[in-house]
Image (spheres, grey):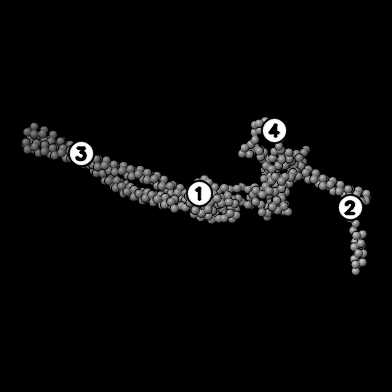
């Protein structure tokens, strides 16, 4: 048994020569060197071809519109309707703030508006009655004035008739044709007619005064109408206060402004919110893009609409397609909060970066804002532009 094992081990040693023994032959060494050189050349050609047809960078990340949700009021948080990471629809409740005091104020404003409505109704009824009464009085006083004027004319006519009769009787008396009693009777009739004329004139003056009083009652109706205008203005102001208070009450409920995902919550129930401070942070995962920072030496090769291949570091095995939609007109350094003006005079040249936006085609990848990606932007857009401009 031992002798057979030794023979098998010896045969296996002969059948499997070592790699170093293979390279000991000059011919094999030359062949290996040629293969290695060919691989290096192939990789170099592939790298050069890739560099000439694409602009690649790893300085890129997923971006989104980060929405900071804030409040216009201060108050105590009574409830939180979502948790971090929850998907929400536009209008979903995120926070509720204690609104009892605002509700009481709204009730006061509504009561004031109702009181003014009641006053307006009463004033309108009073104006209607005053208008009817003033109309009747004016018509009655106008008729009384006309009647008094007619009585004056009748009394004047009677006085004139009595005056002519007195003159005729006095002439006859002077000629001795009638007795003294006839003259006295004619004088009494003239005096009676004159007194009747005076009474009629006095009645006409009284009727005219009463008509003026009735006209003054009509002026009172106009004053009531003026009061109605003032009351209506007060009611409009009260209704505006009610509507403004309703808006204020709505501000006590913090809702999602759009569809998206809640990224961060800054308050817990029982805490006191501050006006103008942000309360939550969210974004829409269906509206993300890639923000790539391209070297200024490569930016001339990029055109709007150029196709892009994106590979996320979180899932590099699934490429995502997209297109260039915006190229910034300034470098990132110029857009920084504190740009470097190089005040000390010491200069070190650094290649600047320019932001490029890449909109992605519909995909199923889980892309989170801030995560890193690698992009390869095709130069085909550049070639097509050049071809299109050629004569």
**Label 1 or label 3, whichever comes before in sequence order:** 3
Q: Nearer the viewer, mark 4 or mark 2?
A: 2
User: Which residue lies under the disc numbered 1?
Assistant: 273
Q: Nearer the viewer, mark 1 or mark 3?
A: 1
- Tell me the distance, in whole angstroms, between the alpha carbons under discs 4 and 2: 54 Å
x then y, percent, for residue 384: 75, 43
Q: Nearer the viewer, mark 3 or mark 4?
A: 4
Question: Where is 22 relative to 170, above or below?
Answer: below
Q: Name the residue rendered at 86%, 48% in the picture.
A: 36
Would residue 300 be visible to someone looking at this image?
Answer: no
Q: Secondary structure at mark 1?
A: strand
User: Which residue lies under the disc numbered 2?
Assistant: 20
- Tell me the distance, in whole angstroms, between the alpha carbons under discs 1 and 3: 84 Å
**Label 2 or label 3, whichever comes before in sequence order:** 2
The reply to whether dot 1 and dot 2 touch (C-beta < 8 Å) is: no
The reply to whether dot 1 and dot 3 touch (C-beta < 8 Å) is: no
The reply to whether dot 4 and dot 2 touch (C-beta < 8 Å) is: no
x then y, percent, for residue 241: 43, 47
For mark 1, does the 10 Å Cα neighbourhood hold few (<14), some (14 to 19), or many (20 or more) residues? many
For mark 3, does the 10 Å Cα neighbourhood hold few (<14), some (14 to 19), or many (20 or more) residues? many
For mark 4, does the 10 Å Cα neighbourhood hold few (<14), some (14 to 19), or many (20 or more) residues? few
Displayed quadrant of residue 357? top right
**Label 3 or label 4, whichever comes before in sequence order:** 3
**Label 1 or label 2, whichever comes before in sequence order:** 2
In the rendered structure, find residue 347 and report the number of the disc placed on it. 4
**135 displayed left or right of 352:** left
User: Dividing the image into 4 quarters, which one contains the C terminus?
Assistant: top right
**Label 4 or label 2, whichever comes before in sequence order:** 2
């Amino acid at each position: 048994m031992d002798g057979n094992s030794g023979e098998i081990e010896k045969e296996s040693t002969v059948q499997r020569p070592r790699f170093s023994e293979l390279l000991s032959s000059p011919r094999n060494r030359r062949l290996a060197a040629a293969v290695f050189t060919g691989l290096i050349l192939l990789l170099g050609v592939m790298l050069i071809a890739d560099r000439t047809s694409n602009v690649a960078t790893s300085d890129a990340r997923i971006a989104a519109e980060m929405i900071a949700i804030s409040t216009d009021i201060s108050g105590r948080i009574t409830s939180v309707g979502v948790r971090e990471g929850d998907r929400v629809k536009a209008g979903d409740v995120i926070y509720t703030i204690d609104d009892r005091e605002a509700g009481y104020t709204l009730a006061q404003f509504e009561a004031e508006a109702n009181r003014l409505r009641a006053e307006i109704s009463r004033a309108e009824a009073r104006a209607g009655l005053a208008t009817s009464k003033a109309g009747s009085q004016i018509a009655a006083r106008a008729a009384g004035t006309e009647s008094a004027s007619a009585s004056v004319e009748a009394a004047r006519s009677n006085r004139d008739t009595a005056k002519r009769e007195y003159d005729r009787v006095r002439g006859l008396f002077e000629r001795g044709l009638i007795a003294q009693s006839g003259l006295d009777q004619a004088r009494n009739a003239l005096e009676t007619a004159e007194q009747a004329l005076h009474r009629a004139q006095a009645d006409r003056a009284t009727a005219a005064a009463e008509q003026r009083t009735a006209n003054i009652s009509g002026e009172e109706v106009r004053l009531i109408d003026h009061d109605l205008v003032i009351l209506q203005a007060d009611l409009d102001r009260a209704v505006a206060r009610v509507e403004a208070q309703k808006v204020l009450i709505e501000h006590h409920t913090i809702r999602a402004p759009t569809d998206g995902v809640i990224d961060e919550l800054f308050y817990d129930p029982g805490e006191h919110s501050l006006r103008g401070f942000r309360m939550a942070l969210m974004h829409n995962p269906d509206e993300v893009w890639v923000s790539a920072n391209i070297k200024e030496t490569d930016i001339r090769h990029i055109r709007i609409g150029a196709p892009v291949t994106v590979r996320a570091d979180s899932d590099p095995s699934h490429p995502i397609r997209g297109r260039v939609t915006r190229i910034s007109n300034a470098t990132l350094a110029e857009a920084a909060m504190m740009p470097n003006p190089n005040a000390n005079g010491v200069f070190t040249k650094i290649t600047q970066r320019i932001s490029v936006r890449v909109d992605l085609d519909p995909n199923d990848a889980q892309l989170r804002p801030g995560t890193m990606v690698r992009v390869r932007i095709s130069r085909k857009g550049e070639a097509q532009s050049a071809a299109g401009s050629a004569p």
